[in-house]
Amino acid sequence: MKVAFIGTGSMGGSMSRNLAAAGIDITVFDLNKESMQKPVQAGAKAASSAIDCVKDSDVLITMLPTPAAIESCMVSSGVAAAMKPGSMWIDMSTSVPETAAIVEKSFAPGVRIIDAPVAGMSIGADKGTMSIFAGGDPADFASVKPLFDIMGDPDKFFNCGARGTGYAVKLVLNMLWFNSFVATTEALLLGVKAGVDLEVLRQSLVGSPCNSLLLERDMMGLLKDGDYDEGFAVALACKDLRLAGDLARSVGVPMEVGAVVENVYRRARARYGDKAGEMIPAKMYEDDTNTLLRFK
């Protein structure tokens, strides 16, 4: 199986490296040439262009930052038209079915499509322990399952249903994580300002019905070291929240909490810049209350 991989950023670089290290015949491409070094050092071939990358490939995997970037790569740059009949496109980006439908119009007959966005942060991509949420034909899943098992945890591969459902699950997941993060940040600050030691407060919440992976795992870098997780930029968080809101409007679901959280993220992005980490809203709360959420 000949694999092409386009998008070797903070997530895609590790994912493609893991495929190369497992012995997969893989060619990679990214507009940022430097980012291709991680998979190339593990045995991947570097393409000179996106079309060169996909030439004669059986499977194309894309891991791109936005729906607009996907459309630009696949349609405007001619990648979709260059894919051979009978090959497969696996989009592991956080995107929407509407973009996939636009791309599909440029494919040769018989090109199969899977949407398979991922979760697990950059550390999960690095260790190959990501969750994968796939939408498409189960027969197509089976044919490329060995690739998914290299990039993610085999026990965390989810057949979400028809095409587009993988995208939907990922948007719901991200929306819920951001909502929970803002709510947890507010709760921790409230307790600390009321005189409770942060570690005592966290341990109390972990031992309560309010426990979550956010408290147990995801926020530890912030609470210990002030790490706002620049591995995932706040600009991308805002993009995901906007896409979740668009999805909600398209299916007629009110998103009152989501709308408030999106506004919190937009304010944090405006204050600290596009490249600030996905946990940067916590710094905004800290700055506004003159209180650091740090263990003593």
Image: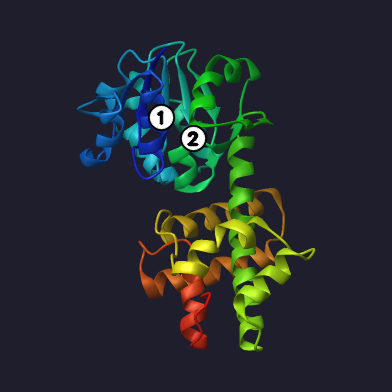
Which quadrant would the N terminus be assigned to in this image?
A: top left
The three-letter amino acid code for the residue at tag 2 is Gly
Contact flag, marks 2 and 1 (Cβ < 8 Å)? yes
At x 52% / y 53%, what residue is drawn? 240
The three-letter amino acid code for the residue at tag 1 is Asn
Above or below, 48 against 126 in this view is above
Secondary structure found at label 1: helix
At x 36% / y 31%, what residue is drawn? 17
Q: Point out residue 85 in the picture as x, y percentages from the top left corner.
A: 43, 11
Viewer-nearest residue: 9 or 80:
9
The earlier-in-sequence mark between 2 and 1 is 1
Question: What residue sits right under mark 1 in the picture?
Answer: 18
Q: How is the image coloured?
A: rainbow
Secondary structure found at label 2: loop
202 relative to 226 in the view: left or right:
right
Residue 93 can be seen in this image = no
Viewer-nearest residue: 55 or 193:
193
Residue 81 can be seen in this image = yes
The quarter holding residue 262 reads bottom right
Question: What residue sits right under mark 2 in the picture?
Answer: 128
Above or below, 252 against 201 in this view is above
At x 35% / y 61%, what residue is drawn? 275
What separation in Å lies between label 2 and label 1 (alpha carbons)?
Answer: 7 Å
Viewer-nearest residue: 17 or 202:
202
Q: Point out residue 130 in the picture as x, y percentages from the top left corner.
A: 54, 38
Above or below, 23 against 18 in this view is above
| Most distant residue in the right direction | 209
Above or below, 80 against 131 in this view is above
Q: Point out residue 256 in the picture as x, y percentages from the top left corner.
A: 68, 66
